[in-house]
Structures are given as structure tokens and as C-alpha cells.
Image: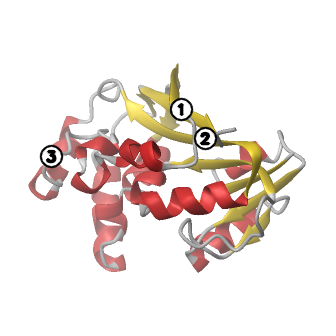
């Protein structure tokens, strides 16, 4: 099968998809991200583009995957484009990792450091549920007027074990931290690292998977 990944980022999901499908097309608008994917996942075919303007022909893929990104899309426009590039009965899979509790062991000192600047309405330190953000709460509604069948959902336990650098990188991947000026960003991440005392941390995630097909 040929599948398309939208908003591929640095290729975390892409690297898993290449082991499962014959052809992987990865669409990512950011050139820096595309350079990372090229280096980390050369088996995929990388394409510059967006979910609202997918640079592929009609009915060209069997499935579309989106990880940690659909809430950023213009939902109705993206669904129209996704339906266009999918073959008849093609599948759409959306997924997010969401926390089920705090890190183990606790990272109280890091929380105290970040608390003054932590975004409102997002619980510290692992609340990645996009439904808490105003622009993302209503994304399922877009499917009611789309070419797709009703969404189905499953949830899977997906705890992550990371070392100190891995946890620092996790914080650095958060949008409000990653968008800081480089000097400020590096100083903040150095301070985060200095407040982590364990060699390993368990992040209690679960993966929420939503899937559907183009209606017959």
C-alpha cells in the first residue's frame, strides 16, 4: 500500500510507517523539519506542502496518517484534501499521545522553574490534550459534513522511559519553549537539566487513535 503522512515533523511516526507499507509519502511544510526527516528516514519520499494543499494527484494513496498535528489544521479544508487524495474506501488515522499522570519520579523542581511562564489552561507538566486549547476543541465536528464515515477510537497504554536528556528534549519540543530565542531557549533547557536528579524517568502516556474511511 501507498500511504501519506501529513505534518510529519521530524519523522517519529514516519520511521515506524516505513516498516509497514510499500511507499511512504511524508508531507511537511517546515524546511528544517524536512532536513531532519531526510537524514533520519531516507526510505520515505519527502514532499513540501500542507494538509490544506496536498501536492498529490487525486486518488493516489491508500491511507493517510496524522500524528500530533490534526488540531493545527484548518479542519474542513484539510478533510476535503485528504478525501481527494485517498483512493475509494481509503483510511484516515489520527493519533495523539496523552498523559495519564505525572512523571515518575516527580520533577517538582522543574515545575517550579517553569510555572511562572506555563501557558494557561494546560496542566503541568504533561498535559498534551489538544482539546484543552481553544483552537482544537471542536475538530471532530468537521467530520459531520465530510466525505468520511463516523470516527472510531481506541486507546492504548504507551508509557515512555527516557533518560535525563530525553526529558529535556521533551520539554524543548513544546511549542511555547521551542519558540523562544535560541540563547534564551538553551539557557532555560540547561536550567531544566540541572534540576533533574534521576537517571531515568517514566512518562505515563496513552495513545488515542481515531480512524475512519472514505464513505462508500
Q: Which residue is mark 2?
A: 93
Cα–Cα span, label 1 and label 3: 23 Å
The residue labelled by disc 3 is 121
Q: For this rendering, which residue is in front, 199 or 86? A: 86
Residue found farthest to the front: 216
Q: CA distance from mark 3 to mark 2?
A: 27 Å
The answer to whether mark 3 and mark 2 are in CB contact below 8 A is no
Question: Badge 3: how crowded within 10 Å, few (<14), some, or many (20+)?
Answer: few
The secondary element bearing badge 3 is classed as loop
Horizontal side of residue 139 vs 118, given as left or right: right
* Image-quadrant location for residue 53: bottom right
Residue beneath the point at 45% across and 48% down: 145
Where is residue 44 shown, x and y percent of the image?
Answer: 81, 60
Q: Residue at x 28, y 74 (%)?
A: 184
Please tell me how crowded label 1 is: few (under 14), some (14-19), or many (20+) other residues with Cα within 10 Å: some
- The secondary element bearing badge 2 is classed as strand
Residue occupied by mark 1: 209
**Viewed as shown, does residue 102 lie left or right of 123?**
right
Compared with 159, 98 (above or below) is below
Residue 90 appears at what percent x and percent y?
73, 43
Amino acid at each position: 500500500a501507498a500511504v501519506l503522512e501529513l505534518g510529519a515533523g521530524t519523522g517519529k511516526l514516519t520511521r515506524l510507517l516505513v516498516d509497514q507499507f510499500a511507499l511512504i509519502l511524508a508531507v511537511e511544510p517546515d524546511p528544517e523539519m524536512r532536513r531532519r526527516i531526510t537524514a533520519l528516514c531516507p526510505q520515505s519520499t519527502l514532499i513540501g506542502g500542507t494538509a490544506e494543499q496536498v501536492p498529490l494527484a487525486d486518488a493516489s494513496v491508500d491511507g493517510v496518517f496524522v500524528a500530533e498535528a490534526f488540531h493545527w489544521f484548518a479542519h474542513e479544508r484539510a478533510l476535503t484534501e485528504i478525501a481527494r487524495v485517498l483512493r475509494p474506501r481509503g483510511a484516515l488515522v489520527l493519533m495523539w499521545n496523552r498523559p495519564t499522570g505525572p512523571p515518575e519520579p516527580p520533577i517538582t523542581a522543574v515545575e517550579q522553574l517553569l510555572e511562572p511562564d506555563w501557558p494557561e489552561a494546560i496542566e503541568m507538566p504533561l498535559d498534551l490534550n489538544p482539546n484543552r486549547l481553544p483552537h482544537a476543541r471542536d475538530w471532530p465536528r468537521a467530520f459531520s459534513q465530510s466525505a468520511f464515515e463516523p470516527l472510531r477510537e481506541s486507546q492504548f497504554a504507551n508509557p515512555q522511559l527516557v533518560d535525563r536528556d530525553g526529558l529535556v528534549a521533551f520539554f524543548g519540543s513544546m511549542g511555547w519553549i521551542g519558540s523562544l530565542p535560541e540563547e534564551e531557549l538553551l539557557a532555560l533547557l540547561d536550567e531544566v537539566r540541572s534540576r533533574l536528579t534521576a537517571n531515568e524517568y517514566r512518562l505515563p502516556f496513552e495513545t488515542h487513535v481515531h480512524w475512519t474511511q472514505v464513505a462508500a
